[in-house]
Image (cartoon, coloured by chain):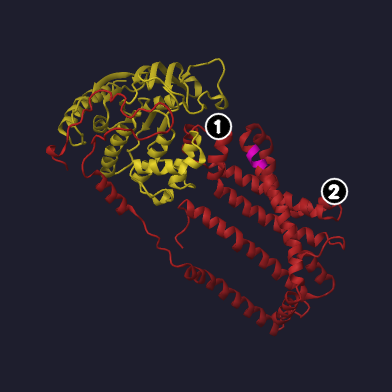
Chain colours: A red, B yellow
Amino acid sequence: MPRPEDLRPVDTAGPVGTAGYRPAGPVLVAAGPAERVEREDTAAVGAGLDALERTTDTRPPAWRRFLSGAYPPVIALVVLLGLWQVAYTQRWKPEYVLPSPASVWDTFAGMVSDGSAFSVIWTSVSRGLVGFAASIVLGTVVGLLLFRFRWLRASVGPLLTGLQSLPSVSWVPMAVLWFGLTDGAIYAVVLLGAVPSIANGLISGMDQVPPLLTRVGRVLGLGPVGLMKDVLVPAALPGYLAGLRQGWAFSWRSLMAAELIATSSKLGLGLGQLMDQGRSLGDPPTMYTALVLIFLVGIGIELLFFRPVERHILRVRGLAPAT
Amino acid sequence: MTVTLQDDSAAAPSPDDDPRVVPPLPVRPLGAAGVQIDGVSKVFRGPGGSTVHALDSIDLTVAPGEFVCLLGASGCGKSTLLNLVAGLDRPTSGTVRVSGRPALMFQEAALFPWLTAGGNISLALKRAGVARRDRPARVAELLALVRLSGTADRRVHELSGGQRQRVALARALAQGGQVLLMDEPFAALDAITRDVLHDELTRVWKDTGRSVVFVTHNVREAVRLGQRVVLLSSRPGRVVGEWPVRIQGPRTIEHTEVSALAAQITVRLREEIASHAEA
């Protein structure tokens, strides 16, 4: 609390005139001697407030977080394998239905060591990635257009939402009808599965942008395009990412369905085809191996791509959970 | 350059042809008004043909470098008036003349959470036409001005409420306009932080020579900050009183002269609010 004798007189009556007035451009600090307009301790009080408000990162180190995150699923997996082994030794099902974990492991290890597992995975994953990349482009464009033009949204929006709830497997016969047994048919199914999710994720993300941020954008002088690029899309990123994730899940599932149904020697051997091959050759360990590989790819994409990206996006905004 | 907004009720204007989307200002002669509001009225039409007269023939001139506080109870159209000056809305009648694009601050800092503190300021600089290579230095300069040096890389959520408002102030200054509009910017802060920011705002205003239009419902805050306090009535908003603040020396909110004038203005404000009880 300043006493009157601490305060030095400054004339604040009437307009201050032209001190520091710069007509154009963001030049800030006026030339000339600075006059004291604040209390002596203002800077110190401000710094004290800042220091008191400072938060510290209380997260445990990365390796500890990794370990504490990795333990529970590993335990669950071990329990699952144990149950499988018990089911096998008790002969609950004949061996051609439920092979032993060891025989599946042999097939799996064999495919990994001769490299055929990777070529099968790559055939499927490359299809998935190409289809998904195309879906991102298409879904983003569709989402932006639908957000920008109300009439388009009113007409096409419900259709898109309807498509989203349509199981994309049901596109497989259509796609084969249109494109024959080609990669084109597989890509068509992947696109039809992913595009609606991605577009809807982007739209709902932009719908949820606080109006205040849009106002700030307009005050900053952003036009419709700038507003979209600098405010709406970055603000919608969490919703957009949720759409991408769902889009990937849909396209991966529809890809597997397409590979299972569209099996042809003209198409490369993907995971779905591998499983179908195992079925037609009466080779359960191959079928189970294909299932494990499909599962591993799903987990891998989630852990290597979506999880880190999501964590980053949320942490930057202060939305991530503490762990 | 002066941007003139007039009501063109014939054709509803779309946001696309907003005449305020203009490049940074050319030189404007000194002595001209920072903000000139002539006979501005604003009528909102509600559902079922009901109308709300938010503002009624407001005349207000803010000189370059002047600090004016707009005071009023709720429903006096303070925020509507700022929106009109900021170009976010158009008056039903009358004209608003502003030298250049005004900056607008809100009760919330409304920083973009996906950008750092420096990134928020940098975006405003980009829109003001500052070249990319000049922006980091300008960001540092602006952060130093609001006493936040070294926080350029901090995320918005890592800043306290007071720090966020200071970054918002730096962003508003980065826009380069000569007019700073503030819509109860300190209302959500605790008393000590608000006190510090009063000092900071006064210092920054003196340093930069901006015209400030500061809206508040806090009478003492208005007297603490303004060179002139303008009282608006409620529904419709009209200018019903005006007080020059002639207090020598640095003011604080506890200053006896501040309290005395605030008490005087409060009497008038209470009369104005009480007059609505009869209806």
Q: Position of residue A129 (x, y in %)?
A: 71, 56
> Residue at image x 70%, y 41%?
A159
> Residue at image x 27%, y 19%?
B241
Q: Nearer the viewer, residue B186 or A22?
A: A22
Looking at the rendered image, the disc whose residue lies closer to the viewer, 1 or 2, is 1
Classify the position of the N terminus of chain A by image quarter. top left
Label 2 element class: helix
The chain to which mark 1 is attached is A
Report if the CB atoms under discs 1 and 2 are less than 8 Å apart.
no
| Residue A230 visible in the displayed image | yes
Q: Nearer the viewer, residue B112 or A147?
A: B112
Residue A257 placement, left or right of A38: right
Q: Residue furthest front?
A: A32
Reply above or below: B136 against A29: below
> Residue at image x 48%, y 46%?
B115
Reply above or below: B169 against A84: above
Name the amino acid type tagged 1.
Gly
Reply above or below: B12 against A299: above
Return the mark for residue A178: 2
Residue B18 placement, left or right of A283: left
Label 1 element class: loop
Name the amino acid type tagged 2.
Trp
The magenta span reads: A141-145
Q: Nearer the viewer, residue A212 or A165?
A: A212
Residue B274 drawn in magenta = no
The chain to which mark 2 is attached is A
Reply above or below: A175 against B30: below
Residue on which the image places disc 1: A223
CA gap, disc 1 and disc 2 = 42 Å
| Residue A164 visible in the displayed image | no
Q: Main secondary structure of the magenta part?
A: helix
Disc tally is 2
